[in-house]
Image (tube, helix red, strand yellow):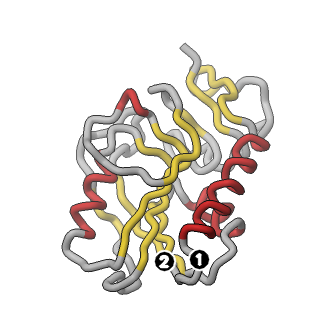
Amino acid sequence: MNKKADKLIINGDTFIPLLTEEQIQKRVKELGEQISNDYKGKVPVFIGVLNGAFIFMSDLIKNVDLECEIDFFKLSSYGDSKISSGKVKLLKELNCDVNGRDIIIVEDIVDTGLSLKYIEELFSKHTPESMKVVSLLVKPESLKYDVKIDYIGFRIPSQFVIGYGLDYQQKYRNLSSIYVLSE
């Protein structure tokens, strides 16, 4: 697998570059700086949504100039498909106490908003000091739920994407760029 290919052929599908590694890293740095300014003097807890957000979250917190904590939970709404199943399952719970804390949910992508809506409902049972959401990618045309995303990396078309943590049948997360399924 060529990690910087002009196109990828996977199971007969053609994927072409959407965002380069350089574009992604530049934007992640900007998001880290913005969060650092917004949370000056605070110690936020970054909560990554596994598996997809782990690469983005790793790069993001390297660009955050604050004391911070990290935790993860794992949700599933896709399985091995290119489209959401329409149901969200919690596969791994948090290890930290979020009550009274400033929390930042880190998502790789917000598609329909279903997972984010589920996360909002999960946290409604707690009393965090504040809760904000940072998502590397957002598909505005696909949103079906009214969810608030405080920090957005890129707005992208409603097409299937892989790379930089985003998978297809649990593979291709290790691509350094983001590729889109060609029409």
Q: Residue flagged by tag 1: what amino acid is it?
A: Lys
Quarter residue 49 falls in: bottom left
Q: Furthest-top residue in view?
A: 183
Going from the N terminus, do you reach mark 2 or mark 1 first? 1
Which residue is at 41% across, 51% downward? 149
Q: Nearer the viewer, residue 183 or 155?
A: 155
Please state, as top left, top right, bottom left or bottom right, where the C terminus lies in the image.
top right
Quarter residue 82 falls in: top left
Please state, as top left, top right, bottom left or bottom right, where the N terminus lies in the image.
top right
Residue 89 image offset from top left, x and y in percent: 27, 57
Q: Which mark is residue 40?
A: 1
Whether 160 is drawn above or below 126: the answer is: above
Residue 118 image offset from top left, x and y in percent: 26, 56
Q: Residue flagged by tag 2: what amino acid is it?
A: Val
Whether 123 is drawn above or below 50: the answer is: below
Q: Nearer the viewer, residue 182 or 65?
A: 65
Q: Secondary structure at mark 1?
A: loop
Which residue is at 68% across, 54% downward? 30
Residue 5 image offset from top left, x and y in percent: 78, 30
Report which residue position mark 2 lands on.
45
Q: Nearer the viewer, residue 107 or 16?
A: 107
Instruction: Give me the C-alpha separation between circle 2 and circle 1.
Output: 13 Å
Q: Which mark is residue 148?
A: none
Whether 67 is drawn above or below 76: the answer is: below
Number of the front mark, 2 or 1: 1
* Other residues around mark 2 within 10 Å, as few (<14) / some (14–19) / many (≥20): many
